[in-house]
Amino acid sequence: MAGVNLPVEPVRRLVGVTADWADPVPTIPFTLDLSTTLYFHNAGNGLLLGISHEQEAGFCREFSYEWLREFDAAAEVCAPPLRGRNLVGGWAGLYENTPDRNALIGHARELTGFFYATGFSGHGFLQAPAVGELMTDLYLEQDSFIDPTKFSIDRFGKEGSITYETNII
């Protein structure tokens, strides 16, 4: 809309919430199996469940259940009691993915006053305090606690300057 081209693609991610369990669910921290990308944590007396599964880029935010087959196969490997859980709700949202799956943070040379912080691929909430500080420093044109050029869109034009993210869920 502003005329600044940023290489970011939206990708749908889905999570589900189980019905309350008959017995009290113990306190479960966010648990992630990196080998399958299956994850879960408490949601009331049930669980929030999810898995990273292949999706086409686009703006679809419709909730569906096609991911459950892949979730159940992964649960068979790392958390068998989670297989086949009935869901009472769910959510679909968008991850914003860059080509290297790392955030874009900086200011656009072609549009004065346009700053960007996008492409966090699901890490944005965790990184928000640091990103807010970095954006403030960029806006005020002062030195920051981290070198902002690592996050600039310019990294895509330089040989060997890209670090690929390996654990996106």
Image: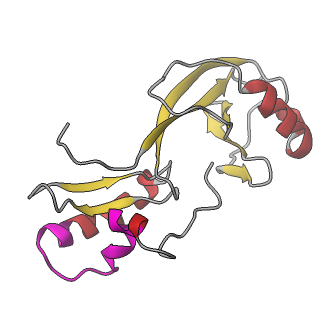
Range covered by the magenta-colored residues:
136-155
Where residue 109 sits, quadrant-wise, is bottom left
Please tell me in which quadrant of the rendered image residue 43 appears.
top right
x, y percentage for residue 88? 64, 16
Instruction: Locate residue 166 relative to residue 78 in the image: left or right.
Output: left
Nearer to me, 54 or 90: 54
x, y (%) of residue 117?
31, 55
Residue 145 vs residue 54: left or right? left
User: Horizontal and vertical percent for residue 86?
Assistant: 75, 18
Question: Residue 157, position in %: x, y?
Answer: 39, 67
In the displayed structure, would residue 49 be above or below residue 66?
below
Q: As rendered, which of 29 and 87 lies closer to the eye?
A: 87
Quadrant that contains the N terminus:
top left
Q: Is residue 111 left or right of residue 99?
A: left
In percent of the image, x 8 and y 58: which residue is there?
112
Q: Residue at x 64, y 49 (%)?
A: 30
The residue shown at (33%, 75%) is 149
Relative vertical location of residue 26 with respect to residue 64 in this rendering, above or below:
below
